Amino acid sequence: MNLYHYAAPATFYRLAGRWTPWFAWGAGLLTGIGLYISFFVAPTDFQQGEAYRIIFIHVPAAWMSMFIYLVMAFWCAIGLAFNTRLSFLMARALAPTGALFCFLALWTGALWGKPMWGAWWVWDARLTSQLILLFLYVGIMALWAAIDDPKRGDRAGALLILVGAVNVPIIYFSVKWWNTLHQGSSINLTKAPSMATIMLVGMLVMAIAAWLYTIAVALVRVRGLILERERHTDWAQEAMKALKEA
Amino acid sequence: MVWQSGTEFWSMGGYGLYVWGSFGVTGLGVALEVWLLRRGQRSLLNRLQRMQRWEAQ
């Protein structure tokens, strides 16, 4: 298999179009299953009552916000190192969804913090570093929007993304490094998870659903970006015609 | 089954505002993104075609 073949915009454009419905349907299906587990299978928590059910969105959203950022940083590093056109477009396609999940992690966190801690917001290390992540997302998108030359925009955005990537481990380890009001992680790679299996399953199903959703919307977005960049080529003009007829 | 009645389900043990506020805004956010994406793709296509016509002249 030749990876460069798939990195060609024309090929990837076609593949992305073919894959999108699968990811979208998968996301819908798993969201249904995940919501069913969240509300009808998972039992009431003995400490937090029903309020803990926020976890089924809060944790997947927080994971996504960090992971999408790392994926963007990965594509930017590849783009800067190998000068591959598609890589920067991947980062551009992912950013809005990352920002959405970052906002949702903060929002659901506030709605969870109020009944449990008695405060919508506290300036502890976890919350503050997550807020910085949101600012990074917004800043990156504003930077892209402000630079007219697409190639310069790609590079400037990539640089900001790579520098900002230092914030992700800070978010992740903040609950270990500092005394935070935010609880430590219930799941990590070295220990058995400190939560009921069904809660863990529900959270994982929701997280996979969020992944499939992210891939689906990012593929749609990247197709638009590819068309925009390649609009002078024959294949792109063919594709536009086909889209217009559909 | 966890819930005895519909009312009990919606009240979420007194945490209804927080639980539904979380799930509701998440649903809205996703719906908004999908809507903006569809609208954006349509307007992009129109813009590209206008540019193409303009450049052809």
Image (tube, grey):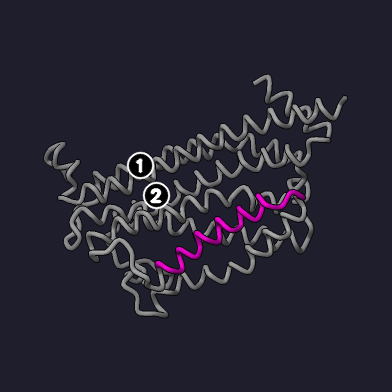
Q: In which chain is the residue bearing label 1?
A: A
Q: Is residue A31 left or right of residue A2?
A: left
Q: Is residue A181 left or right of residue A103?
A: left
Q: Tag 2: residue type? A: Val
- Residue located beneath label 2 in the image: A205
Quadrant containing the C terminus of chain A is top right
Q: Are marks 1 and 2 in contact (CB under 8 Å)?
A: yes
* Crowding at mark 1 (Cα within 10 Å: few <14, some 14-19, many 20+): some
Q: Earlier in the sequence, mark 1 or mark 2?
A: 1
Residue A131 horizontal/vertical position (percent): 45, 63
Q: Which residues are magenta?
A: A127-149
- Residue located beneath label 1 in the image: A33
At horizontal 48% and vertical 56% (from top left) the residue drawn is A64
**A17 w.r.t. A198: above or below:** above
At horizontal 67% and vertical 52% (from top left) the residue drawn is A146
Residue A191 horizontal/vertical position (percent): 37, 72
Which image quarter: residue A230? top right
Residue A125 horizontal/vertical position (percent): 41, 73
Q: How many numbered discs, if any?
A: 2
